[in-house]
Amino acid sequence: MIPRWAPMYSWWIQDEVIQKLNWRNDQLGRPAGKTAALMIYMALTMKSSEEPGLSRVKITYSRLSEITGISRELVREGITILESLEMIHFEKVGRNNIYTLVNKRTKGGWCKIPVKQLMTEDGKIISPFKELRLRRKIELHAIKIFLYLASVRNNHSEFSMASYETIRKAVGVSDKDISRALALLSLIGMLARVSSEKTEDSKENQPNRYYLTGYKSFARSSDMNS
């Protein structure tokens, strides 16, 4: 059975490690490799949810390539980047590749990301990733913003609240690129809807409310993950 959501460590977003994943060639790696790194991190997180309480995932390069839709070369690059950022620990035991999702918090530091709503019915592929080519910065920005929005959601709410200013400061993306990235998230089915509301005692708009795909399963009242 495919779980509705998976717990994802978010310390690396809170500690601004996410800003190192920029669209530039640098010591960390190529832009496409950084996009691949986030796709792989999501895939590993989703796989880890299949066995509650575990942060270790046994999976082959071929399976990671299949679930994300990226080449084995990019899988290698992405894993190297995740290790460099200390987001995962990789070890080879016999013929098995074992990945441990690193948690640098003794308390808290995690959020929920959707699983079932993003997977194909057979659970083999993350559907929205089929639309990505890893050739445009907007794709990297979109995944960064998606994961940031997941990390700031209140556990009692179905939506995440954030202004462009807070997204820009947290993720390191310009307002113009934020708009484009949000449009892409909607197009590929990772963002269900966005709403803007005014406060009762003011004509000013509150920060936007972002409803990620699968949001109805997020609130604490629906914590049964099946």
Image (cartoon, rainbow, N blue to C red):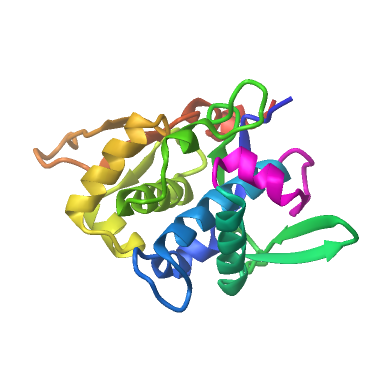
Q: Quadrant of residue 168?
A: bottom left
Q: Is residue 209 visible?
A: no
The C terminus is located in which quarter? Answer: top right
At x 56%, y 63%, the residue is: 77
Q: Vertical placement of 195 versus 25: above or below?
A: above
Q: As drawn, is 175 to the left or to the right of 108?
A: left
Q: Vertical placement of 178 versus 14: above or below?
A: above
Residue 148 vs residue 35, the one in the foreground: 35
Q: Vertical placement of 139 versus 14: above or below?
A: above
Q: Vertical placement of 163 versus 218: above or below?
A: below
Where does residue 216 sit, x and y in percent of width and height?
Answer: 50, 26
At x 48%, y 38%, the residue is: 129
The N terminus is located in which quarter? Answer: top right
Q: Quadrant of residue 85?
A: bottom right
Q: Is residue 141 magenta?
A: no
Residue 7 vs residue 146, the one in the foreground: 146
